[in-house]
Image: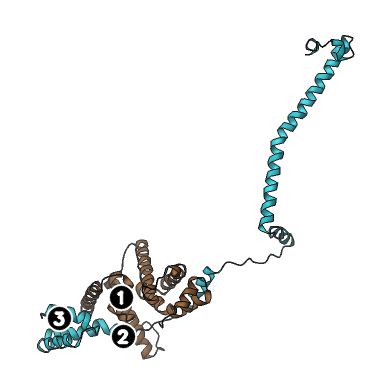
Amino acid sequence: MPDISRETIRQASQGDRAAFEEIYRHASIFVYNVALRMLGSAHDAEEVSQDVFLTAYHKLGGYRYEASLKTWLYRITVNRAINFLKKRNRERNRTVPYEEAPDMSQAQSGTDNTRDEILKDRQEALVEKMLSALNPDMRSCIILRNLEGLSYQEIADSLKININTVRSRLKRAREKLMALRREVTNEL
Amino acid sequence: MNCKKIRGLILTDYLDGRMDKTQKETLNEHLKGCPACREFEALSRKLVMEPFDKVPRPQPPALVWQRIRETLEPQKRKPVFNPLGEGILRLFNLPKSVFALSSVLTVFLIAVVLTRTPRFFKDLENRHLARTYLEEEIDIFSGNGLTTLEETNGDFDNYLL
């Protein structure tokens, strides 16, 4: 995301809708994608994205440029997504273990799909399955690092944690994913 | 450096491209001499990192911005086609200060009427009672042969019921 100018942020914080829409246009893709990967549902991601931008609109007045706007928005997105997950899990009262997750590794499309589309569907299903096996803390680090390409420092700033905590969570997350994937691979 | 530490580095700084030249050389030296760690490095890259390469990043639907905009913008009043309804609504379209003032005056007048009404009826009743009383007194006076109050010589009490 190219940097949004301070002037645009200032105007948006004073209620300028056009300035706020500019922020939305620049940030909506990464906000939506982080929410989508955290929640595994497009419908839930839409709801959380809407919540993130409404929160940002009302809190822009308090934004102090200590972190970049992108970092600030990542933080709001991850927090909102984790809160949404907790609420959803309370309502469902159970989490879906990795083994029970629907097997989407096989394409469920008709014969008209091209090979590329089939591979894309399989990759999408695999990523979703892998992320669903992680707790929210590990999941957010994997998403921000592997999918959003943030540096360790940027992840630390976004999640307000120590850089060594970022490293630790990534290590544990990848160890878990390695073990799960080796188990599935060995069963095949 | 032992294998456990090497594998920890592989899963973090090595795969994430964070190692400086010296650290990388040290790790590569270990991998040259350790087939288990070499296999671990290859597997971790394939099983844990590659699935996340070039994952599509969809755009949010247009509906998301539409809902945000609708939430931020005030609702507009829908037009009313009922003439009577329009007339009533026009009344309420008066400036707020005028409407407020007239409401206060109305409430005040109602309050005055309600508080004075019992007294009014009480006065009315008293006048009726007084009239009845005087008529009866006149009957008494006329029964006693008196025609004016002066003839009682101020002794009204004896002539009063």
Q: Identify the disc placed on residue B57.
A: none
Residue identifier under label 2 = B53
Among the two numbered marks 3 and 2 on one chain, the one whose residue lies closer to the N terminus: 3
* Residue that badge 1 annotates: A155
Residue in view at x 83 percent, y 19 percent = B134
Q: CA distance from mark 3 to mark 2?
A: 24 Å
Residue A14: x and y in percent read 50, 70
Image location (x, y in percent) of residue B113:
72, 39
In the image, taking residue A29 as reference, residue B66 lies left or right, namely right
Quadrant in which the C terminus of chain B is drawn? top right
**Residue beneath disc 3:** B6
In the figure, the shade used to draw chain B is cyan
The amino acid at mark 1 is Ile
The one nearer the camera, A113 or B5, is: B5
Q: Residues within 10 Å of mark 3 (few under 14, many from 20)?
A: some
Chain name for mark 1 = A
Whether labels 2 and 1 share one chain: no
